[in-house]
Image (cartoon, rainbow, N blue to C red):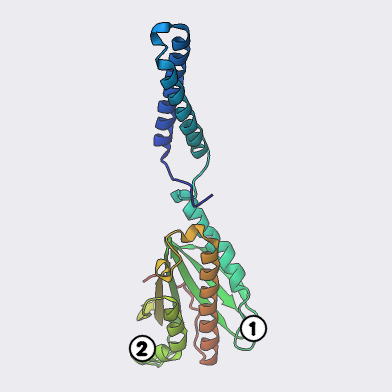
Amino acid sequence: MDRFATYIPRWLRWGLLIVLGGLVLGFSVTFFVSVNDPDFRNWSSAAVSVVQIALTAFAYVLVVFFTESAQSPRVLQRKARHIQTVLMPEVFSRITDDDGAPVGVSVGGQSGVVGYDYTLRSTNAALRMWVGLNVHRVIVIVFCAQPDGVDGTVFLENLKNIFHDTTKGAQAIGYDEPHFQNAEKNGRRFVSVWQTWDIRKGGTGEDFLTHYTSQLFFAQDVALMAQSFLRTGQRHRIVMTTPFAPRPL
């Protein structure tokens, strides 16, 4: 049903209802006049045809009028929110750390325009991740705390090598080249790891938010990436939880 729904603005729906209602009423009157008045008898067939067509269109517009289309901006926003606050935490909860311990998942409130802050924590490791979903564009951001006494450029290059397999695996799915950036906030230095993905390039189509198979693939793939970050960071003793939530810089 979602595939065939058409988004029509409310003002246009009202206009169509009024026009079609006027056609039905006007040609219904014409038909009854033509039945009783020989001078208008030639109009009867045409009037019936117009009334039938107008009634069919009127019925369709009524359905559209009282049905919130799956393509309306409000519905798409609600679907994106469901993916981020229900589906993704559910899939994240299946992640285990490098020792096989399960993680607990906590979801912060909406962070920024299109993202949510997720914290995955086991008895041995922790990861804080920002995931943004802008209709069909995905943004995943992780902050890695820079150890004291370590040069920022050296630490950044080390992270590229440490997470090489993780980022290359994401690129194999369709993510763009990862972006590593040195940053500082409130006296704390860290490296922001930023990855983006245009889901349409993966063949899921432009109807991602109404296509449940694509949504499950997306959530599970982000979970696999998160698990790889968590386990790799655990092995290399990378601190991947900062006092502030990851976000676009």
- Element under disc 2: helix
Marks 1 and 2 sit apart, C-alpha to C-alpha, by 29 Å
Quick check: 94 above or below 53? below
Residue 183 picture location, percent across and down = 36, 79
Question: Is the residue under label 2 in contact with that under label 1 (CB below 8 Å)?
Answer: no
- Mark 1 or mark 2, earlier in chain: 1
Residue 162 picture location, percent across and down = 45, 90
- Comparing 218 with 46, the one in front is 46
On the question of residue 244 being in view, the answer is yes
Crowd around label 2: few <14 · some 14–19 · many ≥20 (10 Å): some
Quick check: 54 above or below 85? above
Under mark 2, the amino acid is Gly
Relative placement, left or right, of 9 versus 87 is: left
Crowd around label 1: few <14 · some 14–19 · many ≥20 (10 Å): few
Quick check: 76 above or below 216? above
Under mark 1, the amino acid is Thr
Relative placement, left or right, of 95 versus 68 is: right
Name the quarter where the C terminus is drawn: bottom left
Quick check: 196 above or below 191? above
Residue 123 shows which numbered tag?
Answer: 1
- Element under disc 1: loop
Looking at the rendering, which quadrant does residue 42 occupy? top left
Q: Which residue is mark 2?
A: 152
